[in-house]
Structures are given as structure tokens and as C-alpha cells.
Image: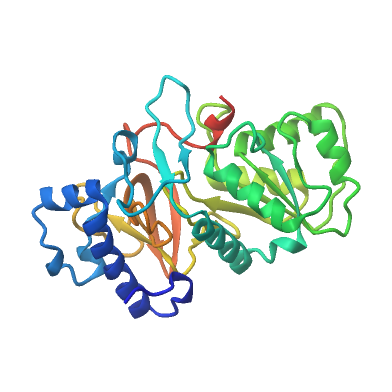
Amino acid sequence: MKQNIFDIKTEEDFRLASLETFIYQYENVEVYRKFVDYLNIDPASVQQISDIPFLPIEMFKNHLVLDKNAKAEHYFQSSGTTQMNRSKHYIANFSLYEESIYKSFEQFIGKPEDFIFLGLLPNYSENPHSSLIYMIDFLMRKSDKKENGYFLYNHQDLLELLNTLHGRKVLLFGVSFALLDFLDFCSSNSQTLNVSDALTIIETGGMKGRKEEMTKDELLDIFRAGFGTDKIYSEYSMTELLSQAYSLGRNIYKSPSWMRILIRNTEDPFSYVDAGKTGAINIIDLANRHSCSFIATQDLGKVEDGTFQVLGRIDHSDIRGCSLLVS
């Protein structure tokens, strides 16, 4: 029986929901069925999460990954230039995506209605196929605050607005290089950023050659000092997902109950490494009901004590990420 993924409470709930999803997607998502058959895996033999085959994320670039019973309303496309072969994730159920956005944000950050949302990002009309921009636009609509807005290149306007919002709960989303650019603007123009602890920063990744590469901890330290708040958080998701994990500091992420991170062996993609060991990230996202919930990414990470870290990219993997939104 199909379970409401947002009602998952226990590991057994998650196992059963994952197995039901696996069978459903094997039967109804053609490219996934062909992939499982190619591996010569009998679906009836899959009894544990570790037995489930994970579809390589590159398949979204060249194949339609979509439930045959569903009609796609829209698609999200990975960031990049027009010369790049970009992934497309077709979306058949926006209400499922929006419920995932809302419940995950509420669990880790708070109720969207309580926040003013600002973005150092392009706006939705400029990027209608960005899953990140759709998410932030949805949160803005839920918030319904008149101050909500996008300020990618309007640093002066953003600074002046931030300095008027003392005591208000303000959340600033931004790709990493854009947040650094804003701090550079404030410094080079001797502009004072007077914010309070009510400000929360959520960086969404994205350097990709834009600025000198640095470790995640170095980056977060710069943001803490520059914005004058300890609430420097991070969000982890991608075009091919409909769920988000959040870090509330120091690159330590937690995922909602309908999402799991597994770490596969980079030398043997069908085996997993022990907790605390580095490998490649596999993601189960049960909100991906109508595409594929089992995705093998090209990110490196490790899992420990119910949390995970993102440590970089596998060598020779494609460049991708939010910084390319403004290429």
C-alpha cells in the first residue's frame, strides 16, 4: 500500500515506502526499468534499501525520466550555458514538490509565513526552469511580505533594505559568489551593514570558477564575519530532486524523513562504505514519485550519526551548480 511520504516516522516506514516506490517506478518509468533490467536485477529480490539500483544522474541529460501515467506540467533544467548538455527533470505534480518545500523548510528553519525572503539570485521570470528559483518564489508567495524580492545586481538597494529591517525575521538566499560580491561591495564602498541576529543567510553553493576556490568552512567563516550573524546556513538539492536538505552550520546536513543519503564506494558502485568514510552520494528522494527516487550523483560525501557532509565532486564529473544560473 502506498504511504503518504510526509507521514514517515520510522526507518521501517521509510524502507517500506522506498520498496513500494521502487516497484512502482520499475513498472512505470521506462528508462528506469531498462536500467534495472540491464543490471539483470530481479525486482522481487529487492528487499532492502541497499538492494535498490540507483539511476546515474547523467541519465536526466539524454533520456525522458517520467512516469508513463503522468503528464508533465513543466520541467526544471540544470544550470549551464547553451553549449552544455543540460539535465531536464519533468514535473508531473507541483503540489507534491511544494509540500516537500514547505515541510522541509518548516522542519529545519521555521514557518515561511514568519520570514521576509530576499534573494541574491535571478528572479523567476528570468529563470522559469530553475528548481531553486521556483522554491524561493514559492516561499515568497507563502510569506507574502511586501519586502520580498530579488537583488542579484542591486547591491545598494539590498543594503538599504537590510538596514531598515531590524527586529524582523529576514532570510537571504544567495549563491556563494553573489554573497561574496555583496560583502565586497559593502567593504569597497565603505558601506556599513547593520543587521541583527534576526537575519539568516542560506547559501546554495556555487563558486565554479567565479572566485578563488576555498573550503566550505573558510567560506562560512567569511559570511559569519561579513554579515555579523551566526545563522549562516546551507541548502542542498539539485535539479533532479524535489526535496531539500539543510545545514544549520559547519557543512553538517540533515535531510527530511522522506529523503536519505547513502554513500557508495567510488570503486564499486554497487557497494557502500561504512559511516564516516568518504564516497559518492546516492540519494533517495521519495518526493520524486513521477520520475526516479533513486539517484546516483557525482558528489562526494560522508554520512555519520544521521547527518551528512558534502565534500566536493568526483574527478572529471561535469561542472554544474547554482553559480551557472547567472552565466
User: What is the residue that sits farthest to the left in this orientation?
Assistant: 40
| Picture coordinates of residue 60, whole percent (x, y) | 34, 40
Q: Is residue 144 left or right of residue 174?
A: right
| Picture coordinates of residue 179, whole percent (x, y) | 68, 38
Please say if 256 is above or below 77. below
For residue 157, what is the image quadrant?
top right
| Picture coordinates of residue 244, whole percent (x, y) | 51, 56
- Taking the image as drawn, is residue 279 in sight? no
| Picture coordinates of residue 319, whole percent (x, y) | 42, 31
Q: Nearer the viewer, residue 80 or 288?
A: 288
Q: Residue at x 55, y 42 (%)?
A: 205
Q: Is residue 233 left or right of residue 271?
A: right
Please say if 180 is above or below 41. above
Q: Which quarter of the figure is the C terminus placed in?
A: top right
Q: How is the image coloured?
A: rainbow
Please say if 198 is above or below 91. below
